[in-house]
Amino acid sequence: MDDKDGKSGRKSQTPEEAGFLTAPPDPAVFATNMVHVASQSQKLLREFLSRQAENHETPQLDPLNLSGALTELLTRILSDPQRLVEAQLNLWRDYASLWHQTARRILGEKVEPMIKPAPGDKRFRYSDWEENEVFDFIKQSYLLTTRWLQSTVADIDGLDKKTRAKLDFYTKQFADAIAPTNFLLTNPEVLRATLAENGENLVRGLSNVLEDLERGKGKLAIRQTDLSAFEVGRDLALTPGKVIYRNELFELLQYTPTTQTVYERPLLIFPPWINKFYILDLTEQKSFVRWAVAQGLTVFVVSWVNPDSRLAKFDFNNYLKTGVLAALDAVEEACGAKEVNAIGYCIGGTMLGSSLAYMAKVEDRRITAATFFAAQMDFTDAGDLSVFVDDAQLDTLKAQMTAAGGVLPSSAMAQTFNMLRSNDLVWSYVVNNYLLGRDPFPFDLLFWNADQTRMPSALHLAYLTDFYRDNLLARGRLQLGGETLDLGKVKIPIYLQSSREDHIAPCKSVFNARTLFGGKTKFIVAGSGHIAGVINPPGANKYQYWTNDKPAKSLDEWWPDATEHPGSWWVDWIEWIKPLSGAQVPARIPGEGKLTPLGDAPGTYVKIKSE
């Protein structure tokens, strides 16, 4: 067709021309593979049922406590039938328009899509989702349906904040699960691969499923990377240093200086114990630790132990005294410094903030400035993780941890975090590993993500109840070390780093801490999310960050006057911390103080596997 009258000049492809109805290269091999797929599927089902039979735990009928929220949603919908009818009519109008648009496109007319995937949605990158009329129709009908579903739920009146958050979250989970990309017959890339490879991709995919079930002991432990491609101490966590102290809870690493002189006050880092510390020392190019050492800082890092049942009763009081305070004692013995600057990352930051409030109460002034990476003090706007915190789910979690010997299995936390980004961390690997039958790509960050830790039940339950559920720290009611904590008593300089796309510690939630501390605070927002927003070395020239030192009572008030800067926020932080780090002194070599090195970094605790 020509270009006049809105025509595109492109001849529409028939299904046969698109290649989906052509025969596979070798029909006999294809048939054999399909028989093998069927037999493997039967084996998969037997394996699953066998594993379930061996599991003697009492099944939870509603472990996520969704029934109440769904019942309330249904009640609200039925109370306003007119709105439901209008919503259904709007959806049918969209479908009718899409049918009309698709018919025009099949006839060769150039037509703009009714709806496009959101920026950053990688599911529909394969060319057929746009170029083939059939799959473009499938894609757009899915996007229209999910938009309608989520907006309909969001528009229901009368729901309390927690119920609405839970329904919004699980509505999105449902929408992600039913995406056409997740199914063989509606994913053009999988269809083409199946025909081109005589179904070999499905055979490999089912083998991957069986392997993941075996590795997960009956639960599907999806591989996100090649787990054999990396080893801690060989490929990751390579910055030279020594284990300078060890107790039952942590090893303290002191890193070898690379400058002739260093700042007087050392830097003591408390990473999260939910994951292992080497996210801060991933590779030479991505290592915050290596970079900080090169800036002339004496760097100490706490490497938390991967706890087992022996630490089941350890709570925040133990992590305060045997963790934070013991680390401060060890730093002083190691290099003679009575004052340090500290960093807390994520839950390690929440622990550091609580410890600072305790130290202010007992007049312990050893920490003179503190930095928080993606850490929350006020959990009013704590994000998607809040949907997992209610009394029913906490009871289920407690029973699960009791059955596991008093610890939260690492797989449970991994599953929770994967749900927060299910398209990227679950469904993309279902397509790649199982439908396309490919091995996941070696990726250092995802290796770290898979290297999960257990958590003591007392500690984890206290975190979820005292912080997420009851918000005791922000309300000035948290008890720690026998003291009632008040963040307003913390007068030292504070640097608050947040990330714009962080779903674990939303930047709005991090901002709330600005009004809780009693001293001067600096708040910045980095580009990207909970990990990439933090681990963004200057040499990468990626993302950006925003600063604004004007007074603001809320993040919405802070944003309009914020200044955007290209690249890494690390350069802003180092200019902030240097004037707070004291004079220059000769570089400190690990072992020159009162503590004898116990071994080389990264130590032994970081290598303890959960399974």
Image (spheres, rainbow, N blue to C red):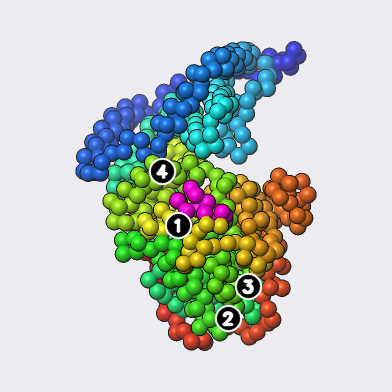
Q: Which residue is mark 3?
A: 368
Query: Which quadrant, please, contains the C terminus?
Result: bottom left
Q: Which residue is at a point 56% across and 65% down the rendered structure image?
A: 357
Query: Which quadrant, please, contains the N terminus?
Result: top right
Residue closer to the observer: 484 or 408? 484
Q: Which residue is mark 4?
A: 391
Task: Name which of mark 4 and mark 3 comes first in the sequence.
Answer: 3
Q: Secondary structure at mark 3?
A: strand
Q: Are marks 3 and 2 in contact (CB under 8 Å)?
A: no
Alpha-carbon span between mark 1 and mark 2: 29 Å
Tag 3: amino acid: Thr
Lateral position of residue 591 relative to residue 314, left or right:
right
Q: Which residue is mark 2?
A: 338
Q: Which residue is mark 1?
A: 274
Q: Quadrant of residue 304?
A: bottom left
Q: Is residue 242 above or below residue 510?
A: below
- Magenta segment: 465-475
- In the rendered image, residue 334, in percent from the top left (x then y), is placed at 51, 82
The nearer-to-camera label among 4 and 2 is: 4
Q: Are marks 1 and 4 in contact (CB under 8 Å)?
A: no
